[in-house]
Amino acid sequence: MITPAEWAEQNAAPVAAALLGWYARTSRDLPWRRSADPYAVWVSEIMLQQTQVERVKEFFSRFLDRFPGVAALAAADEQEVLRLWEGLGYYRRARQLHAAAKRVVAEHRGELPRTATELAQLPGIGRYTAGAIASIALDLPEPIVEANSRRMLARLVGYDKRLDVAGGDEPLWEVAARLVPQAGAGRFNQALMDLGALICTPDRPACDRCPVADRCTARLTGRVDSIPRKALRRSTVARRELAVVVRRGARVLLVQRGPGEWWEGLWDFPRLTGSSRRFAAAGKSSPLLAPLHVDEARTLGSFTHAVTHHRITLDVVACTAARAGRAARGRAWVTPAALATLAMTSPGRRIARLLAAAAIPNGQKTPCGAKKKAAGGTRGARYQAQRK
């Protein structure tokens, strides 16, 4: 029985010809494929990490309109970069993209490096991204292995080992390196990704439309459904948190997420552990809220959101502060209108919409004990939050 690498060596030429021909007939018209500019390719590849193509379409053109080149991105304020990234998630990508742009300007005279090895030394550019930029923008014969092409390559060579362990996909990198042609590497690699995304899907792949079906080991041996091996699913952790909209005059209090926290660098409403029923005790013990002498809270609503492997039920309450507290980095009193200009967490943005819908009059106090009066508004706000 031949190894995956040996299979690739023997089949490289016909596989490349079949994929390049298929790609020429069926390639998708995507905004980032209309230019071979290394900067545009780089931005698209960072955006496409862990994000679906349709989602990226909404952001790519807008981002390049504002930051048309490396110099413009490097000169931007990080908050503006994060604001334009808002909605794509995984904000570390945006911070690393910004940091890499600064390094390119400082160390490479504003031009992206021309080799995969040099590209991989920039923040946020790993093995796959370096290969994608080098092959698509520069047509260098660099291999790529990502979620879609990994699945397709595993089936093609009949590789039935675990991929979700350290080094599990290393044999597939060797396969990709042997398959990528010396000319047309960018089109070949994009064909690999398209084939995995559109034809060689995780469930019920369309083998009858696959240009290399006659060479696919998994298909020929009846193992399409078992290759690649399913990754072990991590269990979801349930949490309950309390977001607090603190008003003082015409302003609300925001806090900036710190290093190591979810949504690092983004603004959010203060959070406490527990539900709205525990606000009185939690607020008095909170180092942030206790000095503000906040009054009783009014419930605005509740919704759930997911972060990595956590499912968080978030209760939202509003209260009024008697004091502004001390000025501190990562803390700001802003007008509700200014919320639209800040880079906020996705739950924070939902709360901002909830706040606008609730239209809390300035300084209004609704004691938690006034359940009958507040009940209808609470249910209505909760309904609106869950529909968004």
Image (spheres, rainbow, N blue to C red):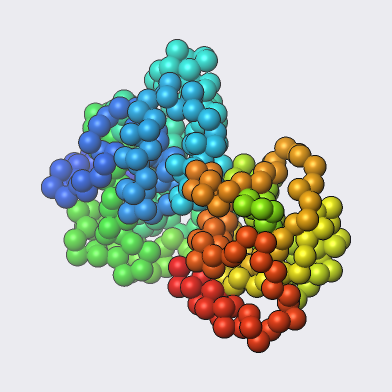
Provide residue 173's location: percent of width, then percent of height.
44, 41
Which image quadrant: the C terminus? Answer: bottom left
Provide residue 161's location: percent of width, then percent of height.
50, 57
Question: Residue extending furthest right?
Answer: 285
Left or right of residue 210, residue 38 in this image: right
Residue appearing at x 60%, y 64% in the figure: 361
Left or right of residue 338, residue 318 in this image: right
Residue appearing at x 36%, y 68% in the figure: 203
Camera-side residue of 114 and 227: 114
Question: From the viewer's perspective, is residue 40 above or below residue 288?
Answer: above
**Which quarter of the figure has residue 373?**
bottom right
**Which quarter of the figure has residue 271?**
bottom right
Residue appearing at x 52%, y 14% in the figure: 107
**Which quarter of the figure has residue 182?**
top left
Provide residue 6's location: percent of width, then percent of height.
37, 43
User: Can residue 376 be seen?
Assistant: yes
Provide residue 247's location: percent of width, then percent of height.
67, 56
Left or right of residue 1, residue 351 in this image: right
